[in-house]
Image: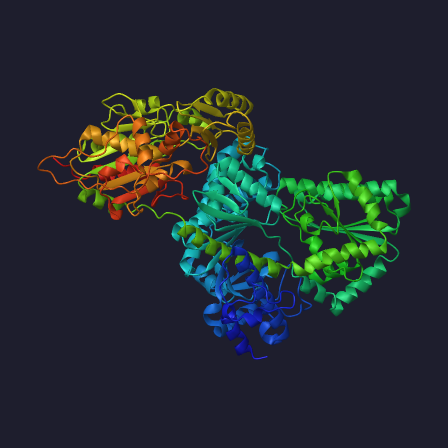
Amino acid sequence: MNVNSFEEDLCVLPNNPPLLQTKRMPGNKYNSSPLTPRTRLERLLRERELRKNRSFLQNEGEPDFFASESFLNASESWGQIDEEEFAGTRSSTDNGERLEGRCKQRLLVVANRLPVSAVRRGEDSWQLEISVGGLVSALLGVREFEARWIGWAGVNVPDEIGQKALTKALAEKRCIPVFLDEETVHQYYNGYCNNMLWPLFHYLGLPQEDRLATTRSFQSQFDAYKRANQMFAKVVNNIYEEGDVVWCHDYHLMFLPQCLKEYNNNMKVGWFLHTPFPSSEIHRTLPSRTELLRSVLAADLVGFHTYDYARHFVSACTRILGLEGTPDGVEDQGRLTRVAAFPIGIDSDRFVRALELPQVQDHIDELKERFAGRKVMLGVDRLDMIKGIPQKILAFEKFLEENPSWRDKVVLIQIAVPTRTDVPEYQKLTSQVHEIVGRINGRYGTLTTVPIHHLDRSLDFHALCALYAITDVALVTSLRDGMNLVSYEFVACQASKKGVLILSEFAGAAQSLGAGAILVNPWNITEVASSIGYALNMPADEREKRHLHNFIHVTTHTSQEWAATFVSELNDTIVEAQIRTRQVPPSLPIKGAVDSYLQSNNRLLILGFNATLTAPVDFLGRRGGQIREMEPKLHPDLKEPLKRLCDDPMTTVVVLSGSDRNVLDDNFGEYNMWLAAENGMFLRLTTGEWMTTMPENLNMDWVDSVKHVFEYFTERTPRSHFEVRETSLVWNYKYADLEFGRLQARDILQHLWSGPISNASVDVVQGGRSVEVRAVGVTKGAAIDRILGEIVRHKGLKTPIDYVLCIGHFLQKDEDIYTFFEPELPFESPAGPRANAADHLRRSSISQIPQAKSGPKVRFRKQRSLSSIERKVSNYLTGGIWRPAIRDRMTLNEGSSVLDLRGENYFSCTVSRKRSNARYFLGSSGDVVTLLNELAECPQSN
């Protein structure tokens, strides 16, 4: 086929539907329409089909162009790849760039170590050895991206000449080095990563030998960890170009996503963890738990090997940070970090092809002759505490003890690759394993044979493939493992033998290969021994079925597919985020709000209290936060600016809150402002007395029965509490265990609707972590009309209000206050009979504003019908049926008479709640402080 024409087709794939037609999906909506897919699923399915078509065309096309890997040569060793092969990928990428032009997306892969080992041969010369693990193997087969590697080269290069020479040498292999000094490496890598994070993530807990020394060194290690991550971020930022995808890897770089977003918030950042993520109960023991979780959440997509690890991460964010967990990930103030499982695979073709090589066939023949007449069991592990090697050997000993007939018919070959040989714990483990092996061989061995062949070294790739191929039973007994790809490699090499896999249920691979493998608990020696016997005696047809199931999974869920799927999901997550961003209010333009404030003649500031004017409190109530928040206090930095605003005769300040009257009195009694308590049902000028804006004859008979229910659930839910107000009751579980609190809230709702409020005229309002029962129609928007009327009557306004600033952290039920002031809403005059009934109930009815003889004529604006609460009460008095409202539409009546408001002079703003009806958004009460300070500094009128 013509390569150039094929690449041109790739560039126009979205508008080329015939390329997407497949026999498996003929003419469906995902592949038959040239239109851009609208939903996330449609986009991902289209991308999946594109990858399959590319793979098919590559296999059918020019082999020299598409093949990035040559067949393995005889010099290749296990875990290494030929430099020509690695360079071949680069030249293929270069060719692809020329052909595809702008279609190729750059992928910046950031890992602790580069896939290159560097050895210095002179002052300005370096020798590079390419080593490939699962990650490098995964990305070798991904053709859609131009991959570049960023990481530490594994050597200390203090001089500038050496750094320049190494950077130049690595550039030829598309690698960019991060230079770390010896002290940083010691504290960051050996200290914090290997001594703190790795044991904790594998459920080994924090170091216990010398707790005092650990405590003293922890902070310096964590500082080095952050410093190293910032050095990685600086290198990434230097080479970053718009449109690049940055993929951060593993626990070494948990701080990196936040550092990158600080450089450029629009950067596409993904983070993947190659180890397990522990239960939240384990993770919470880490002193730096909060900083690390928030840093990872700065990424757009967070990936794990299994759903269990993803679930633990979301649970940790929920329980430790108090954030909202959703089926898609973790949500924080409207921003969603997508969390998903992406089980990694292997390059299965590499192992299948290797079995055909002459040198591998020679190894196979040699091993078959060596172990003729005996069943071969195999274990391949790093000599590590989490691999369960002692448990494996002890289980094998128990099997031999219980099955004498098998003692001379089975052999266990254990490959134990040494790691961290200078660490005392690993030295102790090595001695323990050697002792057990020696005891078993001494007990069950003969002059010519031993039951266990133990090797303290690695094997080259060809020898390993041969060993996989002649194995009857593979034994993986990890105590805790992120994935364990040895099981995948064994399955890939078992096309002829069809051996049995015994797999620990604590390995991530158990979720992928569990159907075809025999799952065991490695801590249960008896169970593992029994499973060995079952595997050795398994009928041929069952072995074949189990192998076929696993072989299909291993050959389809390859490492290349894993990498392509993750990057595809990351790109789509960015698309989703852009869609969500369009639904989120923009940040408040403070300068515009201040300029409009200066040019106006009569201003109205409506301010919420909780989470708006209050000092920030630790969300989860530690260090006394719960007690402080139950008694909210005005932010200390707001006292002066608030006083200046209240003293301005052209400015009217209203604090509108759901709190009771005593709370507002305690915080604002000294200011010249209006206080509206309990969602506006009680009102007073601070120089006057409290008055009520509630309709008369409001039925509150339901209060006692609801109070009994709230008391009962407060007793059953530790750290929950409830408040009794005159128009509502609120049960709050903000500081309780979140999952338990949600269950209790669900039970409360079921009990209330089936009993105490089944026939009552109430609204039930669910907050983020609260349940509130109110009288029907009690909302801030329903009250603001009557509040404005009372303010007009008291103040005797001569000019209409031409500037409104409304700020608050309101429940969704109360956000009708934001739409109340919208000048663009259509005119709707109230019906006569309803208006009369409502007037009968109002404490004061203001139909027009007193005007000075020489003053300008006031313009009246009637934009909405009666308020919902007035409609309810009017119906009640005229014999209608008063029912609980499912949804209230706020309407404007008397207060609107004083408004002459243009759209550019109205600023509604939500605080720390991005999904809102408000026009604008402020991040926290600190931003409110900044805004009110700016307004207070404006010159006042005389």
Residue shown at the point (86%, 46%) measured from the top left: 445
Confirm whether residue 742 shows in the render: yes
Q: Name the residue furthest right.
A: 405
Q: Nearer the viewer, residue 903 or 669?
A: 903
Horizontal placement of 471 versus 272: left or right? right
Quarter where residue 693 is shown: top left
Horizontal placement of 19 versus 879: left or right? right
Q: Relative to 208, does residue 861 appear above or below in the rendering?
A: below
Q: Nearer the viewer, residue 760 or 55?
A: 760
Q: What is the total number of numbered labels drawn onto the structure image?
A: 0
Q: Name the residue furthest bottom.
A: 2
Q: Nearer the viewer, residue 753 or 176?
A: 753
Name the spot of residue 132 as percent of width and height, x first: 60, 60
Residue shown at the point (22%, 41%) measured from the top left: 860
Q: Relative to 486, does residue 59 appear above or below in the rendering?
A: below
Name the spot of residue 677 as percent of width and height, x first: 34, 27
Q: How is the image coloured?
A: rainbow
Q: Quadrant of the C terminus?
A: top left
Residue shown at the point (48%, 33%) measured from the top left: 769
